Image (cartoon, helix red, strand yellow):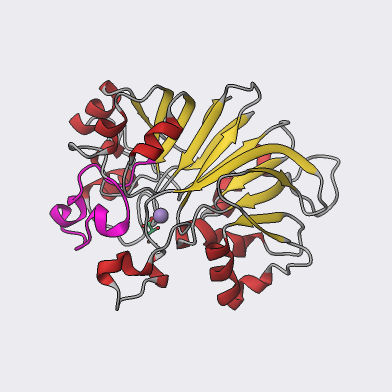
Amino acid sequence: MRVKIIGSAAGGGFPQWNCNYRLSRAARAGNAGVRPRTQSSLAASADGRGWVLFNASPDIRQQIAETPELQPQPGEALRSTPIRAVVLTNADVDHVAGLLSLRERQPFAIYATEQVLSALRANSIFNVLDPSIVPRHRLMENQETSIHDAEGNETGMRIETFAVPGKIALYLEDASRPNDNFGSESGDTIAVRLAGSRPESSAFYIPGCARIDPDLRQRLSGASCLLFDGTVYTDDEMVTAGVGTKTGTRMGHLAMSGESGSIARLADVPISRRIFVHINNTNPVLDENSHEHAAVRSAGWEVAHDGMEIEL
Ligand code: MLT
Ligand code: MN
């Protein structure tokens, strides 16, 4: 199986359109070691021909333009795509807005939890994807799902999904329930396990995660590859950068550093390859010359960039 990280930044991308922070400025200026990145998405293929997207980012048009494998192939129909299905891990804007760019009456299948499907139903603009052409399938947690295309043909992609600690999408927050994680429920954010071509190989895709609990540590044990929430390096990074008031915790994202951060909490879990994805434009690891980048690398982690490929 081939896995391609087509978008490695968090919501807003890197540089973000209105961001004047030093990192976005450096990316805009083309500084060495500070690569621009598009918003959070992954593409995977079991047969090298059909592709399944994991999340559809607002940058999907650019991502397809930069990824020949996702473009209409020679000899195929005048309107065609190798994209067979889209799996959604939550209803965040950076993960669903790209669906709107996949209109044009092109068949593919959508897979998501009931919560995410209900967010799509509640926002009628998603009806640009006519469900009779783009069927929507409910993902059931803790069971294996074979991903099929719109016509019901197998893509060869087998996944398992499970809920991870997280937060409901920003625009779905219930402000009257601040102590209740703003109305978040189990299943608002999920992890995806992609089964590799060999029985023992697997990749986990978890672009949003608020906490690493014993259950998650156990599930990840023995993984061939982990693509994990790398939104912030320190919890209060957006505050200290002066660009916002929200902590990583408030946004449902666990920091990389610190005692309860992802690096420390997963240090003793056997995982062959660990890669940070969904990286926010305030995260200093985006600068390959930073000491934070060096610290992450020496802890055995990689920092994803767009176009990074993994063979499973
Ligand atoms: C997140 O990852 O927390 C969201 O994408 C934030 C947002 O909606 O901008
Ligand atoms: Mn996001």
Residue 106, image quadrant? bottom right
- Residue 203 image position (x, y, % from top left): 52, 32
The residue nearer to you, when weighing 245 against 135, is 135
Q: Residue at x 50, y 56 (%)?
A: 95
Tally of marks: 0
- Residue 31 image position (x, y, % from top left): 30, 37
- Residue 217 image position (x, y, % from top left): 37, 34
Q: Residue at x 31, y 46 (%)?
A: 211
Residue 8, image quadrant? top left
Q: Residue at x 34, y 27 (%)?
A: 301
Relative horizontal placement of residue 78, taking residue 227 as reference (left or right):
right
Q: Residue at x 41, y 35 (%)?
A: 304
Q: Quadrant of the N terminus?
A: top right
- Residue 284 image position (x, y, % from top left): 24, 40
Residue 235 belongs to the span the image colors magenta: yes
Q: Which residues are magenta?
A: 229-254
Q: Is residue 177 above or below residue 297?
A: below
The residue nearer to you, when weighing 64 against 215, is 215
Residue 58 appearing in the image: no
Residue 142, image quadrant? top right
Relative horizontal placement of residue 74, taking residue 11 as reference (left or right):
right
Residue 91 belongs to the span the image colors magenta: no
Q: Quadrant of the C terminus?
A: top right
Relative horizontal placement of residue 112, taking residue 20 as reference (left or right):
right
Residue 78 appearing in the image: yes
Task: State the predominant SS element of the stretch in magenta.
Answer: loop
